[in-house]
Image: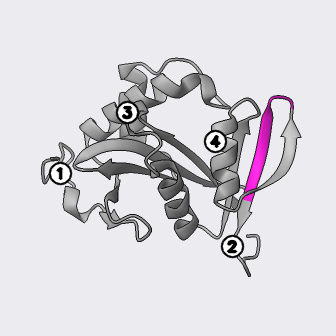
Amino acid sequence: MPSSVDISGRSFFLSLAMINPSNGKIEFRVATSIADYLFLRRLRNAVRQQLTNDTAKLGYLRQFRFYISRPAGLEIHIAWLRGRRAGYLLLRRAEGTCYVTEAVAKRFRRQGIGLAMVRFAIGRAAELTAEIRASNTVSIELHRAAGFYPLALDGAIVTYRYRRSGATTA
């Protein structure tokens, strides 16, 4: 279980711990601790070949810089299942939409965590964009199941969009 205060002094429990209403066992917390960021680094490196942007392995120094800088418009959530970190969800607001990236640790796959993360993201933004490798059929099916529709194909990358009913673009 995470400590109540991370090294930067922010209260862990004030980090918006939330339970996903669609699955009471999965809990989402804003990433605040070094342990959260190390988990994110390990999982991101494990799935990096499925990413659509930078697929280089992420080293400790680069991860530390990222942890310190906390880019504006970026939310990082850790999905917890039975007291264990199970996945991460990145939400990056830019260009009138919110880009979503998610990953589930291998041993937690096929338990509904990916869909719970996407539904959690839908609750956070009226419009979401997911850029997915065309070869990543699991992610494509996940996003389609959550109501995303294909928007564009650019080489090996397919862009999927979700827009909540009645939402307008920014």
Crowding at dot 3, Cα within 10 Å, few <14 / some 14-19 / many 20+, comes out as: few
Above or below residue 66? Residue 129 is below
Among numbered discs 1 and 4, the one appearing first in the sequence: 1
Q: Which residue is mark 2?
A: 164
Q: Which residues are magenta?
A: 155-161
Which is closer to the viewer, label 4 or label 2?
4
Above/below status of 84 relative to 40: below
Asked if disc 4 and disc 3 are in contact, CB closer than 8 Å, the reply is: no
Can residue 73 be seen in this snapshot? Answer: no
Res 75 visible: yes
Amino acid on which the number 4 mark rests in the picture: Ser
Dominant secondary structure of the residues highlighted in magenta in the image:
strand
Disc on res. 139: 4
3D distance between C-alphas at marks 3 and 2: 31 Å
Disc 3 marks a residue whose amino acid type is Arg
Mark 2 or mark 3, which is nearer the start of the sequence?
3
- The percent position of residue 99, horizontal first and vertical second, equals 64, 51
User: Which tag is nearer the camera, tag 2 or tag 1?
Assistant: 2
Nearer to us in this view, 121 or 62: 121
Q: Mark 3 = which residue?
A: 107
Label 2 SS: loop
Foreground pick, 105 / 95: 105
* Labelled disc at residue 9: 1
Residue at 24% in and 50% down: 82
